[in-house]
Image (cartoon, rainbow, N blue to C red):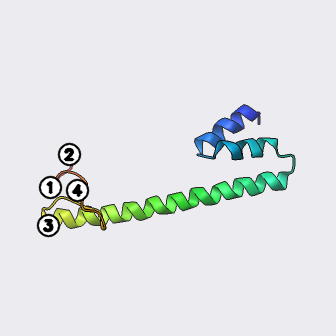
Amino acid sequence: MRAWTARRLLRRQGMPRDEIRAVLAAEDPVAVHRLLELHRERLEERIAEQRRLLTRLEGSLARSAHSGQPATIAGSTSPIGARITGSAT
C-alpha cells in the first residue's frame, strides 16, 4: 500500500497525525501492530461511549413520548428538541 493511501485511510479513522507518521516511519512490523492496536482500542472506546449516549437518548425520548414533556438527557437540563408527539416527521 502506498504511504499516501495509508495516511489518508488512517486520517479517516481519526488517528492523530503524529501516530500516522510513526506508523509510516516504523520498520518493525511489531511496532506498527502495536500502534494500530492502540488506535483500535481508542476507536472501540469511542464506539462504546457513543452507544451509551444513544441508549440514554433513547430512554429519554421514550419517557418524554409518554409524558408529553420535552426530552432531556439524564444529568442535563436542556431539552433535546421539540416535544415528542409519537408521529414520525
At a point 44% along the width and 61% down the height, the residue shown is 51
Contact? badges 4 and 2 (CB < 8 Å):
no
- Residue 49 appears at what percent x and percent y? 47, 62
* Disc with the residue nearer the chain's start (4 vs 2): 4
Q: CA distance from mark 4 to mark 1?
A: 15 Å
The label shown at residue 85 is 1
Which kind of residue does numbered mark 3 sit on? Ser
Residue at numbered disc 2: 89
At a point 75% along the width and 34% down the height, the residue shown is 3
Q: CA distance from mark 4 to mark 2?
A: 18 Å
Q: Is disc 2 placed on a helix, strand or loop?
A: loop
Crowdedness near tag 2: few (<14), some (14–19) or many (≥20) residues, C-alpha within 10 Å: few
| Location of the C terminus (image quadrant) | top left
**Which of the two discs, 4 and 2, sits closer to the camera?**
4
The label shown at residue 25 is none
**Which of the two discs, 4 and 1, sits closer to the camera?**
4
* Disc with the residue nearer the chain's start (3 vs 1): 3
Contact? badges 1 and 2 (CB < 8 Å):
yes
Residue at numbered disc 4: 79
* Disc with the residue nearer the chain's start (3 vs 4): 3
| Left or right, 46 with reference to 78 | right
Where, by quadrant of the figure, is residue 70 drawn?
Answer: bottom left
- Residue 17 appears at what percent x and percent y? 66, 42
Q: Is disc 1 placed on a helix, strand or loop?
A: loop
Q: Is disc 3 placed on a helix, strand or loop?
A: helix
Residue situated furthest right in the rendering: 27
Where, by quadrant of the figure, is residue 30 drawn?
Answer: bottom right
Q: Nearer the viewer, residue 25 or 12?
A: 25
The label shown at residue 67 is 3
